[in-house]
Amino acid sequence: MKQRIITGVIAAALFLPIVIFGGFPFIIVTYILATVGLFELLRMKGMSLLSFAGAAGLIALWLLLVPARYGSEWLASGAVKFGVIAALAFLLLVGTVVTKNALTFDEAAFVVLAVVYVGVGFFCFGAVRLVGLAYFVYALFVIWATDIGAYFFGRAFGRRKLWPEISPKKTMEGAIGGIVSAVVVAAIYEWAAAPFASLAAALGVALLLSAFGQLGDLIESAFKRHYGVKDSGAILPGHGGILDRFDSLLFVLPLLYILLDIAR
């Protein structure tokens, strides 16, 4: 626990200034995190980032991450990003034939889904940050509050398992406590920074993001349980890998970006 706290404090001290500064440094960090995330997923499957499928997936990932403000408007368009995913899928399907099934259909499908999962999630890192720093920090606070609230409520009141086949330690009481904590923190943040039009909007979004973030956490747990690994990686002592730390945000930020786009 001590190592986990120390790593968390150091990571936050390094990450938050880059988030606040934004711009090109933030985009570079996003590319690095996404690349490591794809590497972690491929390693779970027993695939290499340097293989044909891995390299194709990496190029597609980098194209998906191109933001409008720092790259070509054409590359940043939704139609081109869809085309990138479609091209990756067809390329890997051709690869199954050329390699005489040395690259299997399952592996090709895994790479495409991994690129979509990591690529869309980390693209929305930059997208939400471009909409406004206040929204990105709001999302961080909501997720942190959810994690902390779920942990302490689960330890104090946890009786009923949330999803024992996937994550044996999580409880329904912890999940509810995480949502309550997120809503309380969102109320305080809205009072201090007022990123939303009303308190009701801030609380409603917090409720959705907290629930969605916990779903993202469970999905990452399902990946690891399926592939028989404890953590997605070991780059963060006490926390595991990049996906272990960003699994909730990979689900929360796309949802927040959609909500913000609807509200504009």
Image: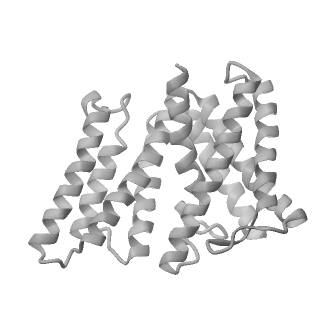
**Residue at position x 40%, y 49% in the image:** 119
In the image shown, does 91 or 207 lie closer to the viewer?
207
* Furthest residue in direction right, as rendered: 156
Q: Quadrant of the N terminus?
A: bottom right
* Place of residue 134 in the rendered image (x, y in percent of width and height, measured from the top left): 64, 29
Does residue 136 sit above or below 33 in this rendering?
above
In the image shown, does 211 or 70 lie closer to the viewer?
211
* Place of residue 133 in the rendered image (x, y in percent of width and height, measured from the top left): 60, 30
**Residue at position x 78%, y 69% in the image:** 2
* Place of residue 214 in the rendered image (x, y in percent of width and height, measured from the top left): 65, 55
Does any portion of residue 171 appear in the rendered image?
A: yes
Does any portion of residue 50 appear in the rendered image?
A: no
* Place of residue 236 in the rendered image (x, y in percent of width and height, measured from the top left): 60, 66
Does residue 200 sit above or below 152 in this rendering?
above
Does residue 206 sit above or below 239 in this rendering?
above
Q: Could you tell whether 98 is left or right of 122 in the image?
A: left
Q: Could you tell whether 32 is left or right of 165 in the image?
A: left
Q: Which of the 4 image quarters holds residue 205?
A: top right
| Count of marks, rendered view | 0
Q: Could you tell whether 27 is left or right of 141 in the image?
A: left
**Residue at position x 25%, y 46% in the image:** 84
**Residue at position x 72%, y 22% in the image:** 194
